[in-house]
Image (spheres, rainbow, N blue to C red):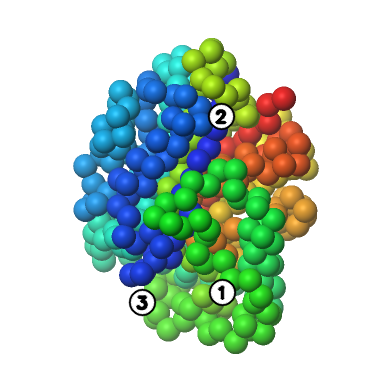
């Protein structure tokens, strides 16, 4: 059975800090807002399931937030919350795709949520980052160190990373000025834009920034034990070439073709294929690119057949590697900016990228688009869409 995307909604991205635009909004309230928005836009009153990705499931994000949100928003819908680190939002939508494609669900709501300001990164105290023996055994290093490892191994220079950071900020500012994010956005708490976007930045602002991940000798030592042939790690990423942390949520409605009879909107895209991939925790952030390669091949396509790529900017080096290896030009890659400029909300990011991909496919009247994310512990997931109509 074919699975379709009927619509996508998201919150703005608020800065993940006290005083940020969504810091006073609970993750539950963000999901409620989006559920009401989906109901208003599509007419959906219930779904066969609801799958929400979230990377830190404790405190405000504990207790199976998906089912809680369905209850408080008045949806007669089950719910489950999944965690595959930063790829959780993509994997929630992949799960919805599998349920519909296999005939186990006619409509499934899926997406992700993360309030980094209310539930900080690593606050769940998992052994992957809190147990020294586990960290040392598997090579579970900080994501920023992993990005510097990639920059070192691939031979990228600081100037290239800075130029990419400026590019994504410039494109994000232009996209917001042109209203390209308005279709999927639902204002929350008076916030109507992604707070991290900074119009008017210059290259000089980037070159003046200090390396963000230098001086962590314990982390470098782990890399040397697991990658003895790498040599000295060149710490090149700065705050300007790293993803900004934010609070956000996004949801999509996935359904079969028959679901259209009960909805007010036709499908906007077909989910062609999905893929997941894994690499070791030191290489870590290259898994998203591998997932893209797999999902494109699974569909019988080549990277050149895809017109829109929404790839989570898990540091600049990963984007440069992706574009170089897959021969994807600037005209197809994160054309409206990305997570370095607008913010990374861990479990929510995948859903935000799917919404952006869907909107850009419509804007261009293009056929194929891919959304993909790399995550902790060497995980990566990707989704391939074909625009309907």
Regarding mark 1 in the picture, which secondary structure is present there? helix
Q: Is residue 144 above or below residue 58?
A: below
- Most extreme residue toward the bottom is 208
- Which residue is disc 1 drawn over? 240
How crowded pointer 3 is (Cα within 10 Å; few <14, some 14-19, many 20+) is rated as few
Q: Position of residue 13 (x, y in %)?
A: 47, 57
How crowded pointer 1 is (Cα within 10 Å; few <14, some 14-19, many 20+) is rated as many
Q: Position of residue 130 (x, y in %)?
A: 26, 63
N-terminal label among 2 and 3: 2
In this view, the mark in front (1 or 3) = 1
Q: Is residue 354 above or below residue 171?
A: above
> Position of 163 compared to 74: left or right?
right
N-terminal label among 2 and 1: 2
Image quarter hosting the N terminus: top right
In this view, the mark in front (2 or 3) = 2
Regarding mark 3 in the picture, which secondary structure is present there? helix
Q: Is residue 156 above or below residue 64?
A: below
In this view, the mark in front (2 or 1) = 2
Q: Position of residue 357 (x, y in %)?
A: 63, 43
State the image quarter where residue 241 is shown: bottom right
In the rendered image, is residue 102 in sight? no
**Residue at 40% across, 35% down:** 36
Query: What numbered label is drawn on residue 5?
Result: 2
**Residue at 39% across, 70% down:** 222
Regarding mark 2 in the picture, which secondary structure is present there? strand
How crowded pointer 2 is (Cα within 10 Å; few <14, some 14-19, many 20+) is rated as many
Query: What numbered label is drawn on residue 218?
Result: 3
> How far apart are the alpha carbons under marks 2 and 3?
45 Å
> How far apart are the alpha carbons under marks 2 and 1?
34 Å
In the rendered image, is residue 222 in sight? yes
**Residue at 50% across, 27% down:** 42
């Amino acid at each position: 059975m074919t699975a379709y995307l009927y619509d996508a909604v998201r919150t703005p991205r608020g800065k993940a800090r006290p005083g940020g635009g969504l810091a006073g909004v609970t993750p539950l309230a963000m999901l409620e807002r989006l559920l009401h928005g989906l109901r208003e836009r599509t007419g959906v009153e219930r779904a066969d399931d609801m799958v929400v990705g979230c990377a830190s499931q404790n405190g405000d994000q504990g207790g199976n937030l998906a089912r809680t949100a369905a209850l408080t928003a008045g949806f007669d819908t089950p719910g489950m919350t999944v965690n595959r680190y930063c790829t959780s939002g993509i994997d929630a939508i992949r799960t919805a795709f599998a349920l519909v494609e296999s005939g186990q669900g006619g409509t499934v709501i899926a997406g992700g949520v993360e309030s980094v300001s209310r539930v900080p990164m690593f606050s769940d105290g998992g052994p992957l980052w809190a147990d020294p023996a586990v960290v040392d055994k598997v090579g579970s290093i900080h994501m920023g160190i992993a990005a510097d490892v990639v920059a070192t191994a691939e031979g990228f220079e600081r100037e290239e990373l800075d130029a990419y950071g400026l590019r994504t900020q410039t494109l994000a500012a232009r996209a917001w000025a042109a209203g390209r994010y308005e279709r999927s956005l639902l204002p929350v708490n008076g916030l109507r834009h992604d707070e991290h976007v900074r119009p008017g930045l210059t290259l000089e602002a980037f070159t003046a920034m200090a390396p963000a991940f230098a001086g962590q000798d314990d982390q470098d030592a782990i890399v040397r034990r697991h990658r003895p042939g790498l040599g000295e790690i060149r710490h090149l990423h700065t705050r300007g070439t790293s993803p900004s942390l934010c609070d956000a949520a996004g949801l999509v409605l996935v359904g079969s073709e028959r679901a259209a009879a009960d909805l007010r909107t036709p499908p906007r895209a077909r989910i062609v294929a999905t893929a997941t991939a894994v690499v070791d925790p030191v290489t870590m952030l290259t898994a998203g690119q591998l997932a893209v390669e797999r999902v494109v091949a699974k569909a019988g396509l080549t990277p050149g057949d895809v017109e829109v790529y929404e790839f989570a900017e898990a540091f600049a080096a990963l984007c440069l590697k992706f574009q170089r290896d897959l021969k994807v030009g600037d005209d197809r890659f994160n054309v409206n900016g990305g997570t370095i400029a607008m913010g990374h909300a861990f479990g929510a990011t995948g859903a935000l990228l799917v919404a952006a991909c869907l909107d850009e496919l419509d804007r261009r009247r293009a056929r194929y688009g891919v959304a993909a994310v790399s995550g902790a512990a060497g995980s990566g997931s990707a989704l391939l869409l074909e625009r309907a109509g």
